Amino acid sequence: MTTLFAHLFRCSAIAMIAASLTGCLSYHLLTEDSPPDLSVIKIGATRETVERELGKPEQKEHNIYTYEYNPQAAPNKLNMSKSQLLFWMAFADVASMGLTAAYGPGIQRAKDANKAEVAIVYAPNGKVLSLFRTDVPGQKQDGTGLFHAWLQSPASLDDQRLCLAANQGYAPAQFTQAMRYGYGIGTEPDDIKAYMWARLAAFGGHPSAEETARGWGRKMNTKDVEKGEALFREFGPADCPSA
């Protein structure tokens, strides 16, 4: 009888260890991130395409969205629905006798340490105007850097840096463009372009742009306002002067 109990005890211990390892492995597989296809995240891509790969943004400020992702993620081939994932996560926790609760946060912290960010500026039509990834060294200056570089030596209001910064969705640069066209500074006056740039700057969160666009709109005829609104809605980067 003693031998039988000893045998049963050994079998139970082996089963418990096997269950625990199975649960731990299941937890690891279930929480493994799928790598995003970064090749589709580019200028002109839609927000829908971006969020299909990166999920919802971690932060949002006006037209700038910040996403997190793991550039070192391994492919997840389980391809489960959310309900299936929740079921097997529960199984993993039970099978590992609660060990996943102990070491799970550690795994998550290790994954979070590998995460990178991408800041994306969207146009009013939901397409990407510019993006900046923290895991890619040597990128060209973003709109903020370009505009501030121009401010250091604004030799010309038709400077390429100002144009590029406005194209990339940087609101202060867009408001500067609105002033250029609105008052004919360094260029021919153009009420429609001025209105468009003011609307874009307001969309990007510039504090004075909305009231400026509204004031100009009251002075313009209805047809020109409609043209400015159409340009605003379908805005895409314009050609910039050569450096």
Image (cartoon, rainbow, N blue to C red):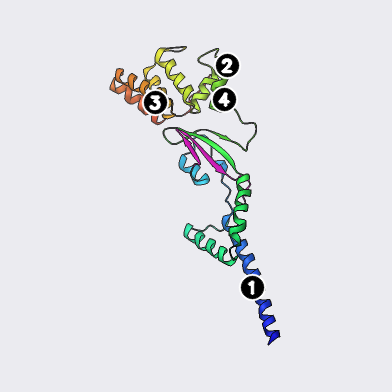
Number of numbered discs: 4
Mark 1 or mark 4, which has the lower sequence index? 1
Magenta residues span 57-75
Name the residue furthest bottom.
1
Residue ID at (57%, 41%): 39
How far apart marks 4 and 3 lie (CA) works out to: 22 Å
**For the residue marked with disc 4, what is the amino acid?**
Gly
Q: Are marks 1 and 2 in contact (CB under 8 Å)?
A: no
Would residue 189 be visible to someone looking at this image? no
Name the residue tied to disc 4.
Answer: 145
Q: Which numbered disc covers residue 126?
A: none
Q: Which mark is residue 199?
A: 3
Residue at point 58% right, 58% down?
101
Where residue 214 appears, as percent x and y from the top left, is: 33, 22
- Label 1, label 3: how far apart the Cα atoms are: 67 Å
| Residue 80 spot, x, y in % from top left | 51, 58
Q: Is residue 193 visible?
A: yes
Badge 1 crowding class, 10 Å Cα cut-off, few under 14, some 14 to 19, many 20 or more, is few
Q: Which residue is mark 2?
A: 152
Marks 1, 2: nearer the viewer: 1
Q: Specify which label sits upstream in the sequence, 4 or 3.
A: 4
Q: Given the image, on which type of amino acid does mark 1 rest? A: Ala
How far is disc 2 from disc 3 in space, using C-alphas?
Answer: 26 Å
